[in-house]
């Protein structure tokens, strides 16, 4: 059979072609990503990390030397106070993200606070990157020669930027917002300078350049926040950074980037990638990397969110309810330009069913196609190997129902799952799925949809019809002391048959089908004070014969 291909295959081909074209065979293929830790790194941002990760994994599979280089844009300015942060943090607006303290006091800085949960989630998903802090690079002078080169060529840079300045751009990312702000200034010679200094006194970038001396490389500025006037020397001091639209192509050339994705906002006419393609060639002597634009990832079904995440779901939230390979699968199975939602509500059950069906398909070599290829990419990495899945794969709908009606008791869950046809040696055989099913029931299923078993028999037992009493009598007379799934299922469906003079194994008539519907509703009313709930056989196994008899015996 021919080897299946997908968007990852094609992106990897493009990365290799770029690597060969620029004559970089003495170093590994470089796939890159970048993100500003200005706030919660949400599920939409995750595409920035996973897209190059999958390309790097494909190249490793081919035996090609590759590195996934990730730049933390933590030297970006703190732009605004997001939801969930203290209002007084507006004091820090304009400072580098690494210079803003963590208001929750659990990390050294604002940027570290938002990097940490993302790093943990990536580790759980088997993603390994070579990380760069732009604060460290800029402050240590790594880019000093590149800064001086850009400043010497500022007139040529301005010619390129001016060609796009009349285009209307709606910023969707931190970098695009910064780039737009940089382009809307006055018309003095220094107003469009490619370098932005941070004030030596207050640390903010609320600075206005007043002069620059090409011979001495002294840059003079005033600060609008505190009135400070200062001079920084670009050849010897590191007190600022290149503006975004110059910074990005500079890094492409400096790092030798062969592939990098970007949000659709980076890809429109006049945005960072289109401008960067010209600047990297004209100014920095490089070639723009092969590029994939990715679309929006939304979410639905969220009941509650931590204030520190700004009210948006982050990868850690998805990993609380979805196995790590499943989260990876959601991103690799679709073209990057295809927008999609991650639903934390009832759709989770269907998603697990689809994943389990694909798992069974992948076990048959004769069925290997693009869908199975996506499964393979999601299930294992070169660094982590095969990612954790349950040794005993129990349907998520069963696990979540059992976790609900047993109030999370692992002993009861283990017993009910075993009696439902999924034998296992220990509760650990059901992990990591069981823990996620419990989380989902607790955090994402509304209280009105949860199952609450009656503590006392229902008053309804005193007002049963003769037919209802007959159904319950047929059920209780035959209810065994030890419950097993198949006999209990047969009995629950069979009580109305017996009421019509049929045997348990007889096919139901239309009358019996109507009786079964009414009987099931009665059982839910008497057991959980609702008209519906988890599958009745599962509920019976969870409650046990003693509780069943106590709640169903007429007065």
Image (tube, rainbow, N blue to C red):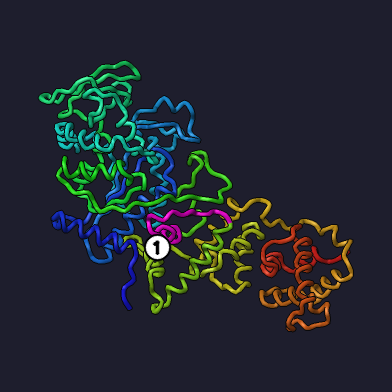
Can residue 37 be seen here? no
Q: Which residue is label 1 attached to? A: 378
| Residue 128 on image: x %, y % | 32, 54
Rendered image quadrant of residue 473? bottom right
Q: Which residues are magenta?
A: 325-345
- Identify the residue shown where x is 42% and y is 61%: 329
Left or right: where does residue 494 sit relative to residue 379? Answer: right
Quick one: SS at disc 1?
helix
Q: Give x and y (percent) for residue 98.
A: 34, 34
391 within the magenta span: no
Q: Is residue 216 visible?
A: yes
Residue 386's place in the image compared with 164, above or below, is below
Residue at the spot x=54%, y=61% of the render? 434
Q: What is the crowding at mark 1: few (fewer than 14 residues within 10 Å), some, or many (at least 20)? A: many
Looking at this view, is 411 or 453 the one in front? 453
Relative horizontal placement of residue 107, taking residue 142 as reference (left or right): right
On-image quarter of the N terminus: bottom left
Question: Residue 478 occupies which quadrant of the picture?
Answer: bottom right
Q: Quadrant for the C terminus, please.
A: bottom right
Is 414 left, or right, of 262 in this rendering? right
Where residue 194 sits: x, y (%)? 23, 32
Is 173 in front, or is 386? 173
């Amino acid at each position: 059979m021919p080897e299946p291909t997908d968007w990852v295959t094609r992106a990897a081909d493009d990365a290799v072609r770029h690597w060969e074209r620029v004559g970089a065979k003495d170093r590994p293929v470089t796939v890159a990503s970048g993100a500003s830790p200005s706030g919660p790194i949400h599920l939409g941002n995750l595409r920035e990390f996973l897209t190059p990760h999958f390309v790097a994994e494909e190249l490793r599979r081919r035996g090609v030397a590759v590195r996934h280089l990730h730049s933390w844009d933590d030297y970006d300015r703190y732009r605004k106070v997001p939801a969930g942060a203290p209002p007084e943090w507006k004091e820090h607006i304009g400072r580098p993200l690494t210079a803003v303290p963590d208001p929750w006091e659990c990390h050294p800085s604002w940027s570290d606070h938002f990097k940490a949960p993302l790093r943990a989630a990536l580790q759980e998903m088997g993603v390994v990157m070579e990380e760069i802090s732009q604060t460290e690079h800029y402050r240590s002078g790594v880019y000093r020669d590149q800064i001086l080169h850009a400043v010497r060529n500022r007139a040529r840079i301005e010619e390129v930027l001016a060609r796009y300045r009349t285009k209307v751009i709606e910023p969707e990312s931190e970098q695009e917002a910064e780039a737009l702000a940089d382009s809307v200034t006055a018309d003095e010679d220094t107003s469009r300078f490619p370098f932005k200094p941070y004030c030596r006194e207050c640390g903010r970038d609320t600075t206005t350049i007043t002069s620059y001396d090409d011979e001495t490389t002294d840059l003079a500025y005033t600060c609008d926040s505190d009135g400070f006037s200062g001079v920084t020397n670009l050849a010897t001091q590191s007190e600022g950074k290149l503006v975004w639209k110059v910074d990005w192509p500079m890094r492409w050339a400096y790092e030798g980037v062969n592939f990098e994705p970007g949000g659709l906002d980076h890809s429109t006419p006049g945005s960072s990638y289109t401008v960067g393609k010209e600047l990297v060639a004209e100014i920095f002597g490089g070639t723009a990397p092969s590029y994939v634009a990715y679309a929006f990832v939304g979410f639905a079904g969220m009941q509650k969110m931590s204030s520190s995440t700004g009210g948006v779901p982050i990868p850690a939230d998805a990993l609380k309810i979805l196995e790590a390979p499943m989260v990876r699968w959601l991103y690799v199975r679709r073209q990057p330009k295809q927008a999609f939602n991650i639903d934390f509500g009832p759709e989770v059950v269907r998603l697990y069913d689809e994943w389990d069906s694909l798992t069974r398909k992948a076990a048959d070599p004769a069925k290997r196609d693009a869908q199975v290829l996506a499964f393979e990419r999601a299930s294992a990495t070169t660094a982590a190997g095969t990612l954790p899945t349950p040794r005993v794969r129990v349907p998520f709908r069963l696990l979540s129902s059992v976790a609900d009606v047993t109030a999370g008791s692992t002993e009861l869950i283990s017993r009910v799952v075993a009696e439902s046809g999924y034998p296992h040696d220990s509760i650990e055989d059901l992990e990591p799925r069981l823990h996620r099913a419990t989380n989902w029931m607790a955090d994402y299923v509304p209280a009105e949809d949860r199952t609450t078993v009656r503590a006392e028999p229902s008053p309804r037992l005193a007002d049963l019809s003769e037919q209802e009493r007959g159904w319950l009598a047929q059920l209780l007379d035959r209810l065994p002391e030890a419950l097993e799934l198949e006999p209990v299922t047969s009995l629950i469906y069979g009580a109305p048959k017996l009421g019509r003079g049929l045997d348990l194994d007889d096919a139901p008539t239309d009358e019996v089908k109507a009786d079964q519907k009414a009987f099931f509703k009665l059982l839910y009313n008497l057991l959980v004070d609702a008209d519906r709930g988890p599958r009745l056989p599962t509920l019976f196994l969870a409650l046990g014969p003693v509780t069943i008899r106590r709640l169903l015996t007429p007065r």
